Amino acid sequence: ECHIEEKMGIKQLTKLIGDAAPEAIKEIKIEAYFGRKVAVDASMSIYAFLIAMQRPDGTNMLTNDAGEVTSHINGLMMRTTKMLEVGIKPVYVFDGKPPDLKKGTLDDRREKRQEADDALAKAKEEGNAEDV
């Protein structure tokens, strides 16, 4: 028996809704979604797993041989497996602005793309575009 539960979002929102409209909040077993496709906020799920799977000092518990963090991958696989086991087809949606946690990665990608564009432009000027 498993319930879908999230601990992120607006503080005390569940209490506010419960107080103002108690019939609006229902606890539903995950099995009730059998045979359905369920949208999952991919960015927030990844972020939640990165935060949830940390040591008390804030360092990451799960990494690969190269030291790269893998807790989000492990978490997504566990959640996806559980959903599939109970007959739910998860659809991961990347919607909206990426979380600040990913800003450094996006900046690095943007810089590398700019460097590649600059190298291609220079190669074209020199007549070596096929080398790039």
Image: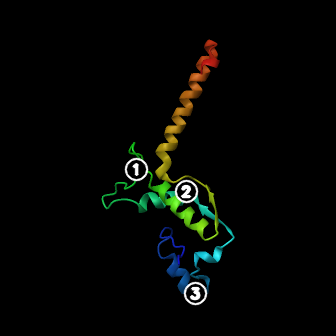
Q: Disc 2 to disc 1, how far (Cα)?
A: 19 Å
Is there a contact, CB below 8 Å, between mark 3 and mark 1?
Answer: no
Which residue in the structure is indicated by mark 1? Answer: 63
Is there a contact, CB below 8 Å, between mark 2 and mark 3?
Answer: no
**In the image, residue 42 lies at what x, y percent?**
57, 58
Report the front residue among 46 and 21: 46
Which residue in the structure is indicated by mark 3? Answer: 22
Q: Secondary structure at mark 2?
A: helix
Report the front residue among 9 and 41: 41
**In the image, residue 122 lies at what x, y percent?**
59, 18
Tell whether 55 sits left or right of 28.
Answer: left
Q: Nearer the viewer, mark 2 or mark 1?
A: 1
Q: Nearer the viewer, mark 2 or mark 3?
A: 2
- Residue at left offset 64%, top offset 69%: 87
Badge 2, how many Cα within 10 Å: few under 14, some, many 20+? some
Question: Does label 3 or label 1 sit earlier along the sequence?
Answer: 3
Type of residue at label 3?
A: Pro
Q: Would you place residue 119 above or below residue 53 in this image?
A: above
Q: Disc 3 to disc 1, how far (Cα)?
A: 42 Å
- Residue at left offset 51%, top offset 73%: 5
- Residue at left offset 40%, top offset 54%: 62
Furthest residue in direction front, as rendered? 85
Image quarter for residue 118? top right
Question: Does label 2 or label 1 sit earlier along the sequence?
Answer: 2
- Residue at left offset 37%, top offset 56%: 61
Is there a contact, CB below 8 Å, between mark 2 and mark 1?
Answer: no
Which residue in the structure is indicated by mark 2? Answer: 43
